[in-house]
Image (tube, coloured by chain):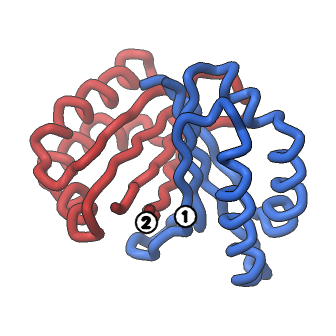
Chain colours: A red, B blue
Amino acid sequence: MIRHAVLFKWTTEATDEQKTAVAAELTALAPTVPSIRGFVLGPDVGVAAGNFDFAVVADFDDEAGFFAYRDDPAHREVVGRTVTPILAQRVAVQFRY
Amino acid sequence: MIRHAVLFKWTTEATDEQKTAVAAELTALAPTVPSIRGFVLGPDVGVAAGNFDFAVVADFDDEAGFFAYRDDPAHREVVGRTVTPILAQRVAVQFRY
């Protein structure tokens, strides 16, 4: 199994509506991507200093499944419309487990 | 459930032995921490540019479970001995799912 863990830091100008839209749109997208085996996300709960603001953790059978998600046109559209406008920093790791 | 996702970037001087020790020591530690409900980790598989080097994803029933892990003396000892010496950057998010 390949796990894709990606953490986002939003811009200081990002509104609650924009942050909520990212979670809602990615949650709606996930069931339409056949290679996704697991998909959870959420905003940081705010109990640790210095954290980023939002996380997505997605599971795939293999690298090809991850690429299928990453390059899915509907995914790219959602990212471009909801994530990119409020993105300050993005950090990711894909790891096998 | 609270998921703790943390991504690490190692220093350029970090050796393979040091990186392997982080994974081995954290893997050995996890079963000794009663509040852990799920625990997976691994080095980045190297298929995406700009990624960090290593990820840990751990699940807990609640924030108290996360704090118990974070502040566990054996955990602090492992982090101080294996992670800190090779740490360039660390980014984390705790989220509810």
- Name the residue that disc number 1 marks: B42
Residue A11 showing in the rendered view: no
Residue farthest toward the top in the current orientation of the protein = A16
Is A70 on the left-hand or right-hand side of B80?
A: left
Label 2 CA crowd tier, 10 Å (few <14, some 14–19, many 20+): some
Q: Between residues B70 and B6, which one lies in front from this camera angle?
A: B70
Q: Chain of mark 1?
A: B
Mark 2 is on which residue type? Arg
Of helix, strand and loop, which one carries label 2?
strand
Have a look at marks 2 and 1 and say if they share a chain: no
List x then y, in percent, for residue A83. 35, 39
Q: Between residues B30 and A37, which one lies in front from this camera angle?
A: B30
Mark 1 is on which residue type? Gly
Task: Choose top left, top right, bottom left or bottom right for residue A26.
Answer: top left
Q: Mark number for residue A26?
A: none
List x then y, in percent, for residue B67. 74, 27
